[in-house]
Image (cartoon, rainbow, N blue to C red):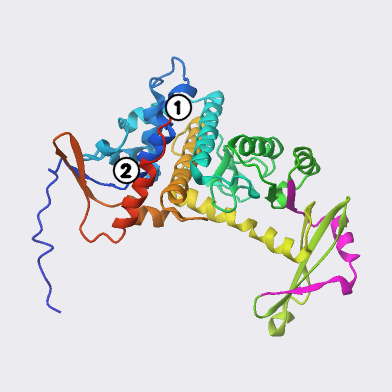
Amino acid sequence: MQSSHALDRTEITFDDHHAVANAGLLMTATLAERLGLEGLVNELVDLGDRPAAARPGRKVMTLVQSMVAGGDTIDDADILRSGATEQILSHRVMAPSTLGTFLRSFTFGHVRQLDKVAEVLLTRAWAAGAGPGDEPMTVDLDSTVCEVHGHHKQGAAYGHTRQLGLHPLLATRADTGEVLHVRQRKGSANTARGAVRFTGEVVARVRRAGARGALTVRADSGFWSDRLIGTCRRLGVAFSITVRQIPQVKEAIAAIAETDWSDIAYTEGGVAQVAETTYKGDRLVVRRTRLIGPQAELWPDWRHHAFITNRTGDAVALDADHRRHAVIELAIRDLKEGAGLNHCPSGRFFANAAWVVLAALAHNFLRWTACIALGIDGPVVAKTLRRRFVNVPGRLTRSARRLRLHLPVGWPWRDTFLAALRRLRALPLLA
């Protein structure tokens, strides 16, 4: 086939001071301005006389917008300094070296100040239309390992996955994938370490943020404990927690009569049934599965999966809802691949703890933008939003006293983008 040399003849020059690399950041920058992120950080985060302590709001804004644009390292913030990108943001963009110094100045107390920022932003975003209101809400608990390389990162250790890394604890909102709370932990931390207090903080946070409906906490067997169940009872929260196959649980399952099992839909080549009994006064819902046909010769026995709950309703429906706890894995995947949690960029533990909170903020800003501006209900994928609405090239010009952002002709999401921007600009400006 005859080759074309047109690409080889294309000259490249870096001389356009009006180019904008990620023009769609105008949407998230507008939302951040309406929610008052920069002023809120300046008010609540006080690093004292530590290095890079002045005006923390612009540094947080820079890191969050960098993650929204796809950055997952501190150096990636440099993309916001290219061309005229800074002019479509509502803050001054800080250099990566300053951002690194800023993060390294954090202590445990400063990370808790950043937690307070996240809570206030959640409250404001929910008041702007992203909240559950009086509707029931399900909170999913889980943890994940953020893999690191090298032994000089504080807190990095090997845990149950046999990967070197840090082991943050997360709580997400099931229907939207928002991160409701996150807490950094060292890599060797047990799954349930700090989970009881963390759950209490999550419930208190969402109540203060405006969740007035019934709450349900779902978790896997790593979080199962009498203390967590007691905390849920004390807070008036329903729970649905997978139990481990300890001898007492196995005895309770074995006592279920064969006539009590009900068939449920399952994949081809297998069969599944659900039944229930009690364990320590609570409902123990059990799902058992096994293969049929030729594969049954390899695994002929029933495999049991049980969870304990204080919820009312049909056991089959409760089992189906409990299995939907898996949606938190989608949120974690998106948090890592879409909002910066794929790396822990500093050698300092509390710098990485602050980074985790900022990654959660960037993750949530994409979801709040989808809900409030784009009218998308339910979980979204950051990569999709970024590809369609954020990573679009533009050019900024000035006409009289107005800035004009020029975007590509024929852009498929032109009308959606303009409608979303109008909705965001209609929100009240919070100090």
Residue situated in front as seen by the camera: 51 or 182: 182
Query: Which disc, if any, is residue 26?
Result: 2
Query: What's under tag 1, amino acid-wise?
Result: Val
Is 295 placed above or below 380 here?
A: below
The residue mark sitting in front, 2 or 1, is 2
Snapshot quadrant of residue 414 = bottom left
Callout 2 secondary element? helix
Q: Residue at horizontal 49%, vertical 48%?
A: 335
Residue situated in front as seen by the camera: 245 or 30: 30
Query: Which disc, if any, is residue 319?
Result: none
Can residue 209 be seen at all in this image of the molecule?
yes
Q: Residue at horizontal 33%, vertical 38%?
A: 77
Residue 247 position, x and y percent, is 86, 56
Q: Is residue 302 magenta?
A: no
Is 297 placed above or below 311 here?
A: below
Q: Which portion, as a residue range, is magenta?
A: 238-266
Residue 140 position, x and y percent, is 64, 49
